[in-house]
Image (cartoon, rainbow, N blue to C red):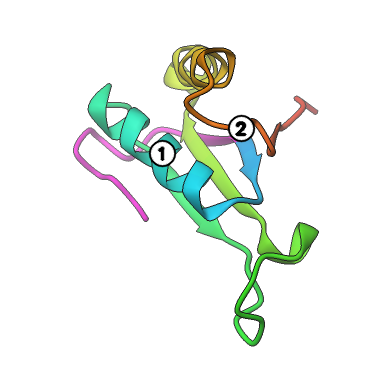
Amino acid sequence: MVNYSKKHSEKYVEIYLSYNDCESDIIGSLLKQDEIPFILRDQRITPYPMNISRFGERRFAVPETEVQKAKDLISDAIDSGAIFGDGKFKKKK
């Protein structure tokens, strides 16, 4: 899913890897609600109807200028129990 509501010429940075469809849907809704543009890269292998570890990975990327805000939003959702936190934050290189 790509949200181009803001200018999309900025560099996007992957920040979170999710392995759970429900978690991904909630994160997408939270980012959209806070008007943080994002790209969701679906790495699932389509022949399999379920998520199997890395075969079910979905990656969230946001503009560089929104990285900290998006990470805080996801962390707050994990801390409050809104999402399980089955995924992981992507480390900076």
Can you say which quadrant of the picture contains the C terminus? top right
The numbered dot on residue 84 is 2
Of callouts 1 and 2, which one flags the residue occurring earlier in the amino acid sequence? 1
* Tag 1 near tag 2, CB within 8 Å: no
| Horizontal arrangement in the rendering, residue 77 relative to residue 5 (left or right) | right
Residue 81 vertical position relative to residue 52 in the rendered view, above or below = above
**x and y, in percent, of residue 5 in the image:** 19, 38
**x and y, in percent, of residue 39 in the image:** 43, 47
Residue, far left: 5
**Residue at image point 64% right, 31% down:** 85
Residue 58 vertical position relative to residue 13 in the rendered view, above or below = below
Indicate the amino acid at tag 2.
Phe
**x and y, in percent, of residue 40 in the image:** 47, 50
Crowd class of label 1 (few under 14; some 14 to 19; many from 20; radius 10 Å): some
Q: Tell me the mark number nearer the camera, choosing from 1 and 2.
A: 2
SS category of the residue bearing label 2: loop
| Horizontal arrangement in the rendering, residue 2 relative to residue 78 (left or right) | left
The numbered dot on residue 63 is none
Q: Main secondary structure of the magenta part?
A: loop
The numbered dot on residue 26 is 1
Please state the extent of the stretch shown in magenta in the rendering.
1-15
**Residue at image point 25% right, 35% down:** 7
Q: CA distance from mark 1 to mark 2?
A: 10 Å
Total labels drawn: 2
Does 11 lie within the magenta span? yes
| Horizontal arrangement in the rendering, residue 86 relative to residue 71 (left or right) | right
**Residue at image point 63% right, 69% down:** 44
Indicate the amino acid at tag 1.
Ile
